[in-house]
Structure formats: structure tokens, C-alpha cells
Amino acid sequence: MRKRFRGNNRGSGLVTVIVTVAFVAMLGVTLLYMAYMNAQIKSADRATRGNFYATETKLEEERARIQNLVSSAIDKAYTAALTQYTAAEAVFESTFIGEVSAAIPAAAYDGDAKLFRYTNPVTFTDEKGYYNEIYTDFVIAAPPFEAQTSGRQELLNNYIIVANNSLTTANTALTVQGNVYAGDISVPGGTALALDSWRVISGAVGGSSGNYAVGGTLSIGANADVWVNRIVVNGGTLNITGSGSVHVADDLELTGIAPRATLEGNYFGFGDSDTDSGRSSSVIVNGRDAILNLKNAASLVLAGRSFVTGGDSVAADIPMSGSISVKGDQAAFLVPDRYLSKTVGGGGVANPGVYDASSMGSAATAPPFQGITVDAAFLADNHASVEWRFSTLGANQLLHGFLTFDTVAHRDEYFKKYYSDNNAAVQEYLRQYFDRTDPSLINPDAAGAVKSDCVYYSFSGGGYTITGGAAAPGMSYGTQYASLVSTLSKSRSAAGAPFEYFVDKAAIAADSLTGVVEFKDDYNAVRGLIVCNAGGAAFEIDSAYPDVNVVVALGGVAVTRQFNGLIIAQGNVALSASINGNPGGFELTDGHSGVTSAAFRAKSSGGRQLLEYMSGNQVGASGSVGGGNWNLNELVYYENWTKNEMRVAP
């Protein structure tokens, strides 16, 4: 038996082959299965990622929708804040919250964190029925907003005094460094006031006349922009130096004993009325030993004419022929003596002439005062008539006979003939005031026209010229002046005087403020005051408030110590101490340290800023809609973001 089976291994190779083939087949099937499953996994992953991205796209679309709603809410809130000044930040915030709440009712507002939060799951289902779901909190932060003045308060930059009524001086030598508005400026004899200002304005509003009354010495700094209704130098001294401009609606008058005026730069007398002496600009010298120094003036524009008051006889003023009048008896409109005669008492006739009051007859009638007559042919040739005016001189009367003309053209024609006949005399009038080398001070233009009611003198190469009407700027300057005396701006107009334009009297009344209301800074220093003294005594700025920088008074203010800041008074401001500047201005931006800015930010015991009692402001902001500090990607963001795995939709 052992012999028969030993060495018989036939068929073993076949078995080995079969086993090997089976193993290889199983391995191939396994590899194929693994490759198939890998393909399936990759396909599922692609589907998952595609589904997720589609879901995330829907999430971003929702975020973009929310950002658009927020942008619209910011726009509406910003617009609402622009209509306010006081509590503008609160108006912005409340409007924004209301708009977002209305647009996204599901959003809950957290007042402490100043943000909205709401959960909104976003899902996406593909064409095979698989879907993804993302859960997240949408967070909407309220945008930062800080109001900044860009309205009326900017106009107060660099002003130190805004006095509706008058600015008066009491000491011999006072200095004001800063811009000034005052209804009137009065410098009595024996006092001196120096205004180191870029702009000085006086306006005939609110019961003031808008005049300078100079009995002492008034000096206005170099290059100042001066606007005034009328300047009367009554025995005092006026110095306006430098290359600035002086704009006068009415007259510059030198009167009294030894008045002196020195004017440099450009002088614009812009009042151009032919009939109203209060709105017609001229230079009138009525004073004894007067000095009018214009030799360094760059230009002189006088759009009006001089007038002689009616005296004792009638109220109507008598227009003269020229804008520069030396004393009240300038011959331009007076009837020349040679055309006068009298039939009573004989002798010559002078115009003006002094006569016994008992012989004058009726004050309102034409001659026969002393039997005086006027040559009828002379009147007819010049289309003129005569008006008589007289003034009392003790027991006598000073009688003037003035020519009046039926048309402006006939008046100008007479003046031209008068100029030709009396050339030397007219030039001599002007030579008293202009120190020039050119002997020809007045020259008719090429057409030979000489207008008697508008003159323009400019120094160019050593000579002056008179031009007919070319330099009459009445309407333009008049409009600017009317705006300046109400708003301190040439381009803004309002009714009333500046106090009413800048101070919110209604807010003061609504809060029932009385007495002296203090406004303190963060260090408990009193920086601002509202003084409710209308109809009462002037408030005295003395040592009681050493840190105060802004005083708003419903009445008058008396300055008895050196002051640094701004005074806004509805009444008078009386100076017996100097005021040295208004540092810092009124730009209420972050980091600004100007004293007036700090004072307006100071708060009352009730928590209200002094600035809240100033009227008519608009606001700006620290960002902009959709950009700058208001970045919508930062205002709208996700929190608590999670997602579910892709599965078959239920």
C-alpha cells in the first residue's frame, strides 16, 4: 500500500492554479468594489459640498438682504438726525431701531449691547431630495453716530462779542482781540478802543442804528473787513489801517472840534439812494480843524450823494450834487449869487446869507425874504426851481437857496457845466483830502459825462478819475450787509439781529431758566453761563467766575476783568477791561480743545449742554452710509453658527 501511493502527485498543480485564480479573482473583486465605493464616496462628497455651498449661498443672500435693510435704516436715521441738533444722537438711534424692528420683526434688540439678534435656519434641497440645514444667529450692531456742528455755530468762529445793542468803552486804552458784532460802537471822549479783528460789523437792526460814534479813539486792525451803517467822528480819532475794506451804507461824517479820520485800503460807500439821505453814501466834513487822511487809500467808492438837512424850516433833506461835501454850504446845488437880487434894502445878495429874523416872513414861503428874487431865465435854462431853507442863528436866520431839477439828466448836465466853470474850485475841495502829485484830480470820461451822484476814485499811476456810474455797487453790497447784520454771514439771511439767530430763546423759556444758570465741565469748573437778565441790570463778568468762557445774556453785560472767550448779549456790552481772543473756535470735533468748544459742551445741573440752547444747527456724523466707519460687513455678522449633515429630506 505504501508503495502504491508514494510519489503519486498528479493534479496538485491544477489545485494550486485554481486556488491562486480564486484568490486573484477575490482580490480583483475586492479592488473593484473598493474603487466603486470610493467613487460613490467622492460623488456623495461632491453632492454634500455642492449642497452645502448652495445652502451657504442662501445664507449669504439672507445676510445681503439684511445689510440692505440696515443700510436703508441708517439712511433714514441719518436724515432724521439732520433735522435736529439737540439730542441728535438719540434721534439717530431711535430711528434706526424703529426701522430695523419694522423691517425684521423677528429681531430682538438688546439695549445694553446696542445690537439686534435673531435666529433664522437656512436649508437647501437638491434635485435628488437631499438637503442641508444651517443654524446661525444674525447679529445687527447699531452704527456709531456722533453729532458735529455744521450749521449756525460755525459762523461764530473767532468772534468774541456779539451784542445786539451796543458796545461801549469806559477806560482809556482797551483791546479786543477777536471779531465783533455790535448794533452800535460808542467810544466816548477820553477813551480808546483797539479792535484787533478780522471782521467788525454794526447793523441797524433790533433798535440799534448800526453806527460808530467816535468821541475818543477807535482803531481797527490791519486788513479788517468792516461793515457799518454810518460813521460819525465827533471830535475824536478814527484809524482804519492796512489793506482791508470798509463798507459804509450811509455817510462818513467828521464833525465837532478837530475830528480826524485815517482810512487805508478800500473804502466802499455803497448806499445809492437819490432821495433818502440815510441810504446814500458820502463823505461829509462839518467839523472845525478836521483832518481826513486818504492818501494811502487804494480806492474810494461813493455810490450816493451828500444831503443838507432841512434845518428849522422843513423836515425834508436837500440833496447835494457831490458825494464829497466840504461843510454844508458846498456850491454845487446852491443858487449862484450872481443870479440873485433883492428889491428891499439894496446891497448884494449872498447864498447862503444871514438876515434879520424879523424880515424873513413866513418860513415855508418863497421870497420876498428881503425882496430876494432869482433870475427866471437861469432857472428855465437849467430846468430848475428853488427851495429855500433857513436855520436860526440867535436873532438872525441863515438862509439857503437850493436848486432842484426836474430830471436826473438835467441835474447831471448842470453839474457838468458847474464843473467846467469852476474846475479849480472843485479840485481844490478834493486837494484838501488827497495828497497826490497828479494835478488832475477829476477827469470826465471819454464821452464827457460827469455824474453828480456816483463817484469812484482810485489811485493808479498817480491820478484819480471820476467815472459815471460804473462803480455803483449798491445792490450787491446792500444785500451782503443785510445778511451780515442778521446772521454774520454774507450768504444767509434772517429776520432780526444775531442774538435771535444764534440763541434758542424758546428752549430757555421752555426749561424755565431764571437767574444765572451755570454749565460745568468734567472737572466741576463753570465754563459757560446763561444769564436771564432781560430788562434788568447788566451782568458783571468779574472774579466770581474765573473759568467761564461763554456768557449768553438775555440783557446786558459789563466786563470788569480780562476775559477770554465769547459774549453773546441781547443788550449792551460795556467794556472796562480788555478781551483777549477766542482761542479754539467752535469746531466740536473729537480731540478739539478750544475753550469755547469745551464751554459749549459743559452741562447744567439738569444734564443739558450749553450747546443745546443754541438754535438752528444741522449735524454731521462720524461715518457714512455703506462706507467709512459704517462698514456693513462689520455691522451685520454671524454668531453661533452650526450645520446638520446632508440627509434625505423628510
Image (tube, grey):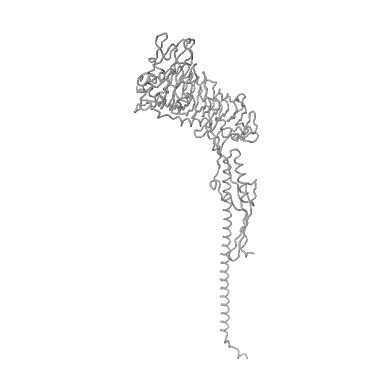
Report the residue at 58% width, 79% height from top: 22
Q: Position of residue 644 (x, y in %)?
A: 63, 61
| Residue 618 in which image quadrant | top right
Question: In the image, 446: left or right of 274?
Answer: left
Quarter-of-image position of residue 437? top left
Quarter of the figure that contains the N terminus: bottom right
- Classify the position of the C terminus by image quarter: bottom right
Residue 232: x and y in percent read: 48, 21
Q: Is residue 474 above or below residue 328?
A: below
Furthest-top residue in this view: 345
Residue 37, percent from left and from top:
58, 70
* Total tally of numbered discs in the picture: 0
Residue 392 relative to residue 528: left or right? left
Taking 280 as reference, is 104 above or below it?
A: below
Q: Position of residue 227 (x, y in %)?
A: 48, 28
- Image: 86 above or below 450: below
Q: Nearer the viewer, residue 324 or 584?
A: 324
